[in-house]
Amino acid sequence: MLAAVATLLTGCSANWGWYVVDPTKSAGQTNLLFLIGGLKFTILLSVVSILISVVIGLLIALAGLSSSRFLRTVNRVYVEIVRSIPLLVLILWVYYGLPQLIGLNLGAFSAGVIALALGDSAFQAEIFRAGIQSVGRGQLEAARSISLSYWDTMRYVVLPQAIRHILPALGNQFVYVLKMSSLVSVIGMQDLTRRANELVVTEYRALEVYSVLVLEYLVLILIVSAGVRWLERRMRADERE
Amino acid sequence: MTELVTETVIEVCDVVKTFGDFRALDGVSMDVAAGEKIVVCGPSGSGKSTLIRCINRLESHDAGRITVEGIELTDQSADQVRREVGMVFQQFNLFPHLSVLRNLTLGPMRVRGLTQADAEARAMEYLGRVRIPEQAGKFPNQLSGGQQQRVAIARALCMEPRIMLFDEPTSALDPEMIAEVLDVMAELAVSGMTMIVVTHEMGFAKRVADRMVFMDAGEIVETAPPEQFFSAPATRRCQKFLQQILGH
């Protein structure tokens, strides 16, 4: 698709510099490979962040549903504060500020993961809370009536049902994290966006390079969305005849 | 049935339960002997469901004392009590994402520590007793209401409780499926299980009950063996109720 668009546009106007990303030219190939090289960092960063954010989010959600008032307060304070901080600001604070606070040096990747995971976890917490609350009370009562422990009830009865309900929202969050991962380019992380920025600086062809960047994210996210939809369909099929 | 002194397995003593301003249970006392079948009936809002839900701590009583199998019922002892008391709900409450077999083996494996093989063997035995062993691999939404309720009964039985509570087990069923569930319950009764059944099925009650309990407005108004209860109800409230319910 990339090649088709690039070839089409190369023929359109001589004033544009599509040659920098023309896959039929060797310079274009080198540049394209350089740009695509950022993909592994984008994906790795996003996947690690969302895995951590899901775990934190689930724990915060369970705290929010607890009978302990202290835990419920922890939930509210955490969610309100984290949701109020713009992600870019959080990234800058974690990368530049946090090391001074804890005396530990953080690489761009670690800082990026921490910031993304924290930033996303508040949304995950709200999504899990809604999902868990959507599981009917009868399910909890049935679990209690056969003496299942709290953790067994969560693990075998409530969460499997909750996750089926919230899968679309979880998929959305994954897409959100993939897009927001572009912000870590500002702290030097070699993701897709950073690579594009660096190429623009050397080749001076902003339109062409950034257009490829747009296409990269578009393709990546379309694939992820399709994957999430496939997973949803499969989960629903499991419960059907 | 021989007239032996049988042990009391449930003691309910002056129990009060309020929801806000509403007194659902207003000083209820009742003793249940081992192997006894009690049918609790009464109009809507009389407290019958609340009473049995207090017995397995799905609701916590506000005053009075409940003792099950010699254990006084508190938040701390609730788990221990629930292992001996099985419950069947009006809405079945099967776990929809698990197969019938898994619905039955989850409790025994996680709570009683059975191996998967033992739990499955037990599950198949009880599925046989409720007459649907061939449905083991299906999911709840593939079964009829009557089959689902029988699976729910089997699930409770798999924990091998000494007492079974039934909260209007046939009220959510289409009429043609009520009989299959009541038959299973009648067989369970014959096998010696201690049962408390909240139900409007008076035919079943006449067949199976050792004692009828009539509740109204949070109180036990009348309790008597079925022959006496149905032929000569002592209180006017009970007479009126029976007229309404047996009228059609």
Image (tube, coloured by chain):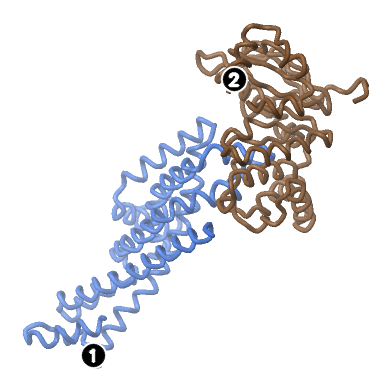
Chain colours: A blue, B brown
Can you see residue B44? yes
Mark 1 closeness class: few <14, some 14–19, many ≥20 residues within 10 Å: some
Which percent across, then down, holds residue A139? 57, 41
Q: Choose between B108 and B122: the one closer to the eye.
A: B122
Q: Which mark is residue B247?
A: 2
Can you see residue A152? no
Mark 2 closeness class: few <14, some 14–19, many ≥20 residues within 10 Å: few
Which percent across, then down, holds residue B12? 73, 18
Taking the view exactly as shown, the residue that stands out farthest to the front is B248
**Residue at coordinates 29% horizontally, 78% vertically from top-left?**
A35
Residue designated by label 1: A27
Q: Choose between A236 and A118: the one closer to the eye.
A: A236
Question: With respect to residue B73, does A124 lie above or below?
Answer: below
The chain letter under disc 1 is A
**Residue at coordinates 42% horizontally, 47% vertically from top-left?**
A127
Q: Is residue B51 left or right of residue A161?
A: right
**Residue at coordinates 41% horizontally, 60% vertically from top-left?**
A113
**Residue at coordinates 45% horizontally, 39% vertically from top-left?**
A75
Question: With respect to residue A27, does A186 lie above or below?
Answer: above
Question: With respect to residue B76, does B242 lie above or below?
Answer: above
Q: How many marks?
A: 2
- The image quarter in which residue A216 lies: bottom left
Mark 2: which secondary structure? loop
Mark 1: which secondary structure? helix
Q: Choose between B152 and B243: the one closer to the eye.
A: B243
